[in-house]
Amino acid sequence: MMKLFDITEKYGKATYAYPFEPYKVHDNFRGQPHYTYDLCIGCAACGVACPSNAIELKMNEEQSKLVWQFDCARCIFCGRCDEVCPTGAVRLSDSFELAVKFDKSALIQRGELEVEKCSCCGKPFTPKRLINYAMQKLETANLLPGRIDEAKEYLHICPTCKQAASVERLTKGIEEGIK
């Protein structure tokens, strides 16, 4: 027995004093995803990339807000949400202590984003933050000044109205070509 103590003293401890001291994780450790509401634009890339469906984006009942919800109990810590988020709103942290006593709702994070209404039909279709993000990207794009204004107006139109306008333009072009 004394020989074991001598070996331990010579080579050091092989275990960690984890419950009594914080456990230090490696730099590339994939812990619990952390959601930063202020950076989220509501693009839904994280929800599409999540293989376990831990991230869900859907409209609320009044169709006035887009609800982003992350259920950590379903998460497999793959890190795909971190990879695809264009603004860094979802980042993997070094947190791994996720035990809860009786209430699993403590593992759920939520965020609500205001929704833009279509300038043609008035139906809600996308988060306002996503439109603002696209406008910022358009300003840095190398487009002609008249085309930027046209593109900015186009951002406020829902896909259904865009499709109807395209069909109308094509029909009008075909009719003019026949005459």
Image (cartoon, rainbow, N blue to C red):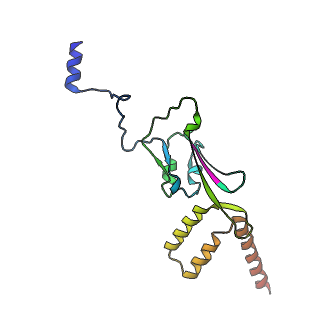
Residue 30 location, x and y as percent? 44, 42
Residue 173 located left or right of residue 35 = right
In the image, residue 60 sits, relative to residue 168, either above or below, namely: above
Image coordinates for residue 138, horizontal then vertical, percent: 54, 71
Q: Is 67 a magenta residue?
A: yes
Q: Which residues are magenta?
A: 66-70
Q: Main secondary structure of the magenta part?
A: strand
Q: Nearer the viewer, residue 91 or 142?
A: 91
For the N terminus, the image quarter is top left
* Location of residue 151 in the rendering, given as x and y in whole percent from the top left corner: 60, 74
Q: Which residue appears farthest toward the top when viewing the image?
A: 1
Viewer-nearest residue: 51 or 119: 119
- Above or below for 123 versus 105: below
Question: In the rendered image, which quarter is residue 121 located in?
Answer: bottom right
Residue at the image point whose x is 39% and y is 44% from the top: 28
**Could you tell me how many numbered marks the image carries?**
0
The structure residue drawn at horizontal position 55% and vertical position 51%, both measured from the top left corner, is 46
